[in-house]
Image (cartoon, rainbow, N blue to C red):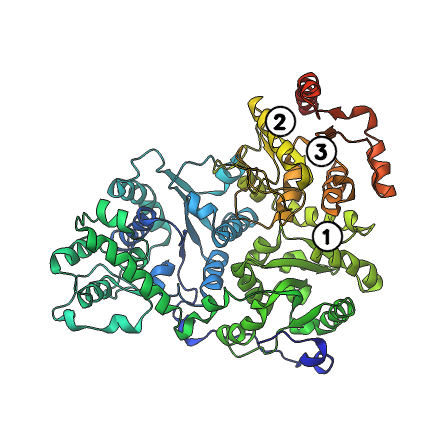
Amino acid sequence: MATKSSSETGVASHHVPQNTPKPRESKSSKASKIKKNVFISHSTESDYLERKFVTEFVSTLKTEYNLENDLWFDIHEKCLFTSSWMSLRLENAEKCKCAVVVLSNAYMDNRQCVNELKTILERSRQNPKGIKVYVVLYEAAELSSAINEQISGKVDLSTYDSDNISEKIFIATGTLGPQIEKRFAKNPTSDKGIGTSDAPPDEGAENNSEYKKKALLHWEVNDVQNWLRSKGVSDFFTDAFLERKIDGFLLASLGEKELTDYLLIDKRHISKKIPELVQERLKQDLNREEAWHCRLSNTKEKPSTIYIIFDPKDIAIAFNVQKYFTAKGFNVTYHQKLGASREEFLIANGPIMAQCSNFLVIVSQSGAGSPFVYNEVVFVEWMERNLCTILVREEGIESKMRPGLKAILQDKPAATLNMSSFGQDMEVVEYLVTPANPIPSNVVLQQEYVYMLTENIRFLVDFLESSSFGDLDANSAIPSVFISYHWDIQVQAYKLSELLQYYGIPSWADFSSAATPQRSQPSSSKGSSSSHASKPFEPAKLDNLQNQIIRNIRKCTVVLCCFSEEYSHSSNCHKDLYTAMTVGKPIIPVLLTNTKFPPEAPAEVRTLMQKYTERVLDLSTGRLLQQNLPKLVQTIHRVNNL
């Protein structure tokens, strides 16, 4: 389905009913509606051992600590393969009375999980009595003092043998189980909870073909047994799956190595064939009706397309935004049907959204708590597309914004909107959508909104920056450097970062091909920021590039601007310079190539550069590098001690 322009969508004639219906829950999601107090926040993209730990940990809490009917675990709720899965998890994070967070590298690399964590901790900060937070450190991490103040219990499993799942389960349940049971367990009943998979196969289940009607990720232990037998796997090997209670979620993580090492299947043709059959089945599942959203993930984005996310009550604002960008040559669209349920709403609008490259979220008093805005934002975040917030200047928006929505939008590019200065404000929005264009004079001031919005949840950002999942400790006395450079001198910039690392100074810059930085073409981001072997400040995959740049410049001790002819004409590099000045970071200019300083540049940029003429350090030759590198290191340490 092609995206529609303003003339095709009939925006002008679109009107808002007096009583706009809210999306109702579909029948498939009513069973998963939030009625349970305890929420398990975990990664669904982890390896077999971590999945095994989580599933056994949850099953033990249910059976031994009377939490059978009061614990929400997406695997047992059978919602993992639905388009509402993302929203359901985040809603549980918003409304649960108790959250158990299983922290690991896989968790921190998952945007869905990080948003849940932000939501949970934001709720705990606002109302400590409203939610209890328990943390399981599956892998090593140092929690900041602010985070430790928010949690009710913690268990560190990082020092235990990674293969000894039974020991980890014993420690975790023994430590946290009694605390959770005392506060939240209901009286146990004889009814089995959704997704209980501890029972062995029923007699005569060999001919049961119920698994064919289900997605593999929703299979019970019995379904896996029946599927294996249908593929001709003998009872000798199927028993290994049964003994370890392998359901569909675990089955999907089993490769040849896992089958050999953990299920002790020593027949190579079996250990090789089963993962192949699993992948075939997963591909078949993509053709299921409920997997429509998974098929959309491969949809090619159309250039210069914008999708506006807004509450129906804000149609007038949306129309003006659409009119502005249409005049600029963009293809602009928005939701075409509200639907009677969350599923209907997403099914109707998802295919259009999948084709768009940019998304503008109008956050007003209506939009801050709107289920329409919420569901579309969560869906876009799952697709990992570019989100930009337009904050309408109205009183009380902050207090009305849902914690989950705030968690997603807090670090996204944003601009405020006042109808009296609409044209000027929309220039800022246009710049955020197309950052390669020249910088409007007022964009630096508008960027203060990003800082304002994150100010109330500063400790959440600090946690993500100071955790030890490959990040720099925010309280470290070691100076940290942000390297701003243009891609044409990437090799020299990379060598500089290595030299700084030798002196014990961590740095952050855009080294997309850090192992072999010898690109002859520009990267997708000409200028700053990405991952780097000397450890980035930010966890990988959490944000788009520009968001990481802004936060890392705020966090660093000093900004090294590697001036060159190309740098002086790059809008992305200019933005690094402006951002550093806006947040008051010291700037040290360096030359890595034979460049006249200040180089030729637009007048306003050249004026800025001239301020640093007396402080520039020339590292462009071997002799100058040997002479000036110690001066650079001393300057960085001196700035850090100010």
Residue type at tag 1: Ala
Quarter of the rendering containing residue 73:
bottom left
Determine the CA span between mark 2 and mark 1.
31 Å
Work out whether mark 2 precedes mark 1 in sequence or the reverse, and give the earlier one.
1
Q: Residues within 10 Å of mark 3 (few under 14, many from 20)?
A: many
- What numbered label is drawn on residue 592? none
Q: Residues within 10 Å of mark 1 (few under 14, many from 20)?
A: some
Q: Between residues 441 and 268, which one lies in front from this camera angle?
A: 268
Q: Residue 386, relative to residue 635: is it above or below?
A: below
- Residue 95: image location, x then y, percent: 48, 59
Residue denoted by label 1: 436
In the rendered image, is residue 194 in sight? no
- Residue 69: image location, x then y, percent: 32, 61
- Residue 91: image location, x then y, percent: 49, 61
Q: Residues within 10 Å of mark 2 (few under 14, many from 20)?
A: some
Residue denoted by label 2: 479
Residue type at tag 3: Cys
Work out whether mark 3 precedes mark 1 in sequence or the reverse, and give the earlier one.
1
Determine the CA span between mark 3 and mark 1.
19 Å
